[in-house]
Image (cartoon, rainbow, N blue to C red):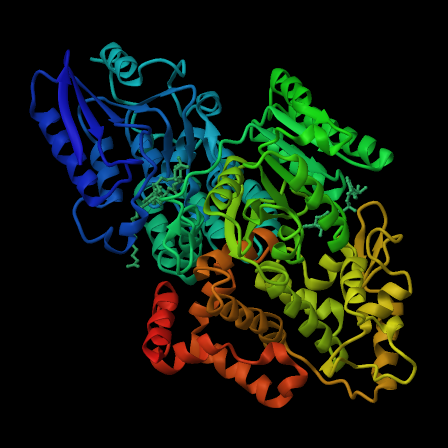
Amino acid sequence: MANYSVRNQVAIISLCSPPVNALSSDVRRGILDSLKKAEQDVKVAAIVICGEGRTFCVGADITEFKSEFKTFPNLFELVDILESSPKPIVAAIHGHAFGGGLEVALACHYRVALSSAKLALPEVKLGILPGAGGTQRLPRLIGIDSSMQWIAFGDEYSAQIAANIGIIDRIFPSNADILESAVQYAQSIIGKSLINRRVSKLPVKDASKVSHIMEKYKQIVGKKSRGAIAPMVCLEAIKHAALLPYVEGMKKERMGIEALMGSDQSKSLIYMFFAERQVRNWTIPGTGINSKNTKPIKVEKVAVIGLGTMGRGIVLSLLKAGIKHVSVMELNKTARENGLLFIKNILEGYAARGTISETQKRSMVDALKPVSNFEMLKDTDLVIEAVFESMSIKKDIFAKLGQVCKPSAVLATNTSALDVDEIAMVTPKPKQVVGMHFFAPAHVMKLLENVRGSKSSPQVIATAMNMGQRMGKVTVLVGNCHGFVGNRMFRHYTVETDFMLEEGAYPEQVDTVLKKFGFAMGRYQVGDLSGNDIGYRMRTKFEMTNKQQPPGAPERERHGVRYCPLADFLVESGRLGYKSDGKGWFRYLGKNRELTVDNEVTSMIDSYRRRNKIVPRKINGEEIIERALYPLINEGFKILEEGIASNPMEIDLILVHGYAWPRHTGGPMFYAHLIGLPKILRVIERHWNNAGLREPHWEPSKMLVRLVKNHGNPDIMSWTTLERETVRSAL
Ligand SMILES: CC(C)(COP(=O)(O)OP(=O)(O)OC[C@H]1O[C@@H](n2cnc3c(N)ncnc32)[C@H](O)[C@@H]1OP(=O)(O)O)[C@@H](O)C(=O)NCCC(=O)NCCSC(=O)C[C@@H](O)CCCCCCCCCCCCC(=O)O
Ligand SMILES: NC(=O)c1ccc[n+]([C@@H]2O[C@H](COP(=O)([O-])OP(=O)(O)OC[C@H]3O[C@@H](n4cnc5c(N)ncnc54)[C@H](O)[C@@H]3O)[C@@H](O)[C@H]2O)c1
């Protein structure tokens, strides 16, 4: 709804729809009714539109998209009504003016804002475009070039930047009273002509350069969008602002939003938006313990053990989160010096770019406390261990931590696959132990996979979850199993793509198909980037690598299961990837590391096939997608079935934020929902029937089978409930 009042000739329409004043049908109706009152009241000479509570308005109500157009006024009707008002309207912006909220402001005749306010047209991130005149009004105010930048990427901008380019007419200090300031401003413009204040009537300044600007953004968007459709549709709509009168341009904008709204990509992106919020409400399946009934421990002092690749990024994340005391412990002198230097250099970089102030930088550097023995950690609230991936080293460290740390201290391990319970058992209080699995580089990657051990106490879990959120991470709580959720699922992707190399595909073909699907890099380029030796080390632990096999052992089998040793040959011939002189699955040439196909690798694959009498066959793109992605989806269902994840959203967030799964497909589980579970199961069963126990990753998940058998293609939001009901009724 919207509240209405009058103060000294100024009518105040305040949006009132907590928490973020989304433009629901009630709010739109409220604005319209208030506007009519203001227009009819002869004592009113100007109008202010503002937002109650913490923000101005974040745009259309995403939960009402389906019915948006059925009730009068819809948003694009409302903005034209506002703009044509005979009385001047001032938008008073604090907090956020996002999406439809900014479009309402653009339809007002003046815009004022607190300096702390943020503005954006982020619709593209939901797979749509600004559909209430944003693509037509913004170019008339700031030009085609800046509009393309704002709309095709959807980033937020400060009120000051918006003022510099002409969106905001007056900025007030962040501690000012926005309503009081806006009312005074409105009084100052009473009686002024509204000619030139109706944005839809303005010319587009850089209209003559539209083709050139369009080409520039097409290039950028083509490279960045990874198959997302909305950015290109946004550019097209903005182009029409330069070429057509406002009314005709609006028709094009409407066509654009009609094409995008309800598309699979938009559904996926909206699902992601809500998943990122819902994941904060964690729960431990089957226990009734959740984020609402469990309080975290207060964390002021944190320690990180190990300052290698992961430790240094974790320290930076903690400093950015405002932790004022971060102890760092690293045994190796060179690693310690390099780690501290790395952290300081990154902080210098942030300060140089203005991401943090000089004062903040100094206080972050002061917060760093190198320590040399465990005794010095005795009053630490949270310890995060990030040493080598070795069970014996980790056990040794946790045993010491268990002796010296205060009883309430939370002891976390950053292991990527080891058993959190086994680590916990060496401490006197296993309930204080939890997994906090960061992703490299930890100060950049948004994902934190927190692992609840079987003994981890609710309060300890709440603390790890809370710390992740303080660090601004998408923090997902998962159960304890080998590889947790992400690594456990991703393993199948590499295994099955390697099988395709055996059978007839080449790395560049697989990577091209995966990139077309939307991955930033294909499986083989990722291997080269992160180092092919990482997987090799893991396979070595399980005695699987080529070198570890006794003479005469079958080349394509390990422990009775199909195995492809091509990745072993690669590493054993010194091709670790970028780091070994640009040689891996591909060859990387020159300063820009330009990716080229290397005949040496092609010959290695060809001769392997000849030796094993494999007749290569043509593998098409559809097969590559199915075989690379469906086993991973199958594993996702097994993870749900075991309660390792509580719902499909958690799995999707992990794959999107930790493994660069394309966001506009919603993650593997949402993608499966879009494809339809019956088809997914059919393909999995076909492979399972052909391969059997030699390829166990194709064994269909029982949950998937049950869902399809009992419900066909149920909605993703009902999967876990339906499964629980089926299992319960079978007991
Ligand atoms: C603004 C934020 C940055 C704030 O972040 P913060 O961290 O402070 O808060 P939260 O993110 O936690 O949010 C709190 C709470 O609020 C919920 N929420 C946030 N935004 C919305 C929203 N827009 N709608 C509904 N709910 C919202 C959030 O879920 C939280 O809830 P919880 O229960 O978890 O506490 C941040 O919130 C943010 O970024 N929000 C999204 C901003 C955004 O994307 N805005 C754009 C929205 S889309 C839009 O505005 C579209 C308009 O341009 C055009 C619409 C006109 C359409 C007319 C077209 C006709 C075409 C017809 C086609 C017909 C086709 C067919 O029939 O299908
Ligand atoms: N590298 C990744 O991509 C990645 C991603 C997620 C998780 N992890 C996990 O994070 C952990 C660390 O991995 P990394 O890549 O940072 O390893 P790393 O080899 O880069 O760093 C480990 C550091 O720990 C130090 N160290 C070893 N024993 C120590 C001890 N007793 N006390 C203090 N310091 C000690 C070493 O000197 C080294 O500097 C591992 O468990 C790994 O599985 C790694």
Q: Nearer the viewer, residue 400 or 592?
A: 400
Vertical comparison of 427 with 688: above or below: above
Q: Is residue 92 visible?
A: yes
Q: Residue at x 71, y 57 (%)?
A: 526
The x and y percentages for residue 230 are: 46, 52
Examine the rendered structure and indicate whether residue 372 appears above or below residue 529: above
Q: Residue at x 58, y 89 (%)?
A: 689
Residue 59 position in % (x across, y down): 33, 39
Foreground residue among 170 and 587: 587
Q: Residue at x 53, y 73 (%)?
A: 634
Left or right, 618 with respect to 541, comes to left
- In the image, residue 85 above or below residue 26: above
Residue 695 image position (x, y, % from top left): 66, 81
Q: Quadrant of the N terminus?
A: top left
Rendered view: 40 above or below 193: below
* Quadrant for the C terminus in the image: bottom left
At horizontal 49% and vertical 44% (from top left) the residue drawn is 152
Report the side of 525 relative to 111 (left or right): right
